[in-house]
Image (tube, helix red, strand yellow):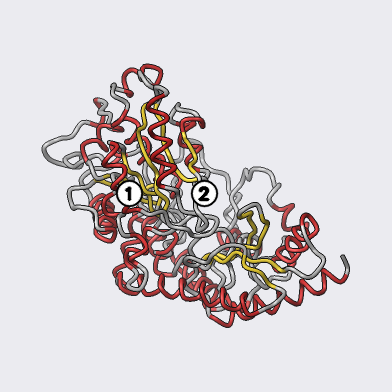
Amino acid sequence: MDTSLKPVARNAEETLDPEDWAGVQTLSHQVIDDAVGYLRDVRERPVWQDMPREVRASFDAPLPQSPAPLADVYREVADTVMSYPMGNIHPRFWSWYMGTSNFTGALGDFLAAIQGSNLGGGNHAAALMDQQVVNWCKEMLGLPASASGTLVSGGSMANIIGLTVARNAKAGIDVREQGVAAIEKPLRFYGSDQIHSCHRKAMEALGLGNRALRRIGTDDELRIDLSALRAAIAEDRAAGFQPACVIGTAGTVNTGAFDDLQGLAALAAEEGLWFHVDGCIGALIAIAPENRWRVAGIERADSVALDPHKWLHAPFEVGCALVRDAAAHRETFAVTPEFLEMTSRGLASANWLHDYGLQTSRGFRALKVWMSLKEHGVLKFGRLIDQNIRQGHYLNSLVEAEPLLELVATTNINIVCYRYRPEGFSGERLKALNTEIMLRLQEEGTASISDTTVHGEHCLRVAINNHRTRQGDLDLLIRETLRLGAEIASRS
């Protein structure tokens, strides 16, 4: 008998727990079986496919008023959401820059949701694990055990956390009490002209404005020019500004270029500036045996932003902000209302983790990272980073071997910028040709790559941040680029 439409007696007490636990258990086993198959067979599916009109229309359905059997709800999810993903778990997904998740991490997310803890703080196991994962991140990057940190949604928020502490530490006044308008000399932050767009958002959110972030030119390798930086700092001081922070980039989003972190650390110390490192792409190279030299100096940073959902392949979302001065970190965010005071015993007898960021309610992000690191060990994750970098250089060699393909930027790590360039194509015509190659690769389900502009030149961009990628996938990408390029060019 279908009880889904059975009227509820007036004043009857209700719950969201199922009436039929055995039925839910059976369905849950089916969900897990389907999930295992979903990942096991991911290579057999298209990387991405557009949704049919009827599937897209299903997301316009009105708000449900009455209950439906859970099996029907799951069937709808399987037919719509699971069948038309972004594609970033696929071995040939190389767009933008994001990790590929892992099954153990997904189990961690499930268990975190089942346990249901709020990581605002308190005396409970999830809060201790949250702090443990932060401590592991400090250890991986070589920051001292006395440093502070917090898990956040991702790299953008991790950068905002670090830069907020930098603003407050260098303002010369109590910004929290008086506001940015009371700062005597306008603050200046510095980064390369390749800096991620989240830093502009940070400047705006911090009330400093985009003009407070001075972009410094880069060399041929797209690394910040230290001489130009030093000159800009001197110029700003002479003009009455207060240089406050230099932002080093450990892996630019466009090309994977690395600023000279050692040189920036020394310059920041000499000039009395806060040294922040945006390591959302490359900070975790610190655990990679063959490539850790690229991030030498990151351990000297005052703050670092990193992304465990990239090269630790945690399911979205989890970022981490680390701050060397734990007191400055807490003083930037801590507020203690009467209803959140610590007690000597009981649930409130531990630190409140919300004192280190903007969220009071915080999800249990740590478990998926913790479980994956416990299962595989940090050494394996380091080897996978080296593997991706080798794959980037392998793709680089394939491009160099093809007369119709052209590298547009130096391949530093795992990001390769190239284009198909037949004779007679240039400017907007060349851009249109390569854009069409990119779109056809996506629409045919072969591979997902993105595009960008480097040194004023449009190009295709392949970011191999993927533990499932194999060399054969890169061979296929080049073959299909050449095939599509020839086909599209012949009709242009």
Residue 74 seen from this side: yes
Q: Is residue 359 above or below residue 225?
A: above
- Tell me where residue 380 appears, x and y as whole percent: 34, 74
| Mark 1 or mark 2: whose residue is earlier in sequence | 1
- Image quarter hosting the N terminus: bottom right
Residue sitting at x 50%, y 45%: 217
- Mark 1, other Cα within 10 Å: few <14 / some 14–19 / many ≥20: some
Q: Nearer the viewer, residue 287 or 107?
A: 287
**Above or below, 24 relative to 167:** below
Q: Amino acid at mark 1?
A: Ser
Of 443 and 67, the residue lying toward us: 443
**Whole-percent x and y of residue 439?**
73, 63
Towards the viewer: 31 or 191: 191
* The quadrant where residue 291 appears: bottom left
Amino acid type, mark 2: Gln
| Residue projecting furthest to the right | 491
Q: Residue 191 lies in what quarter of the image?
A: top left
Compared with 327, 208 (above or below) is: above
* Res. 194 mark: 2
Residue hosting label 1: 117
- Report whether 5 appears left or right of 195: right
Picture quarter with the C terminus: bottom right
User: With 376 as the anchor, is 394 left or right in this view?
Assistant: right
Relative to residue 176, is residue 418 drawn left or right? right
Which callout, 1 or 2, points to the residue nearer the camera?
2
Residue extending furthest toward the bottom? 472
Q: Secondary structure at mark 1?
A: loop
The local secondary structure at tag 2 comes to: loop
Provide residue 462's location: percent of width, then percent of height.
Answer: 58, 66
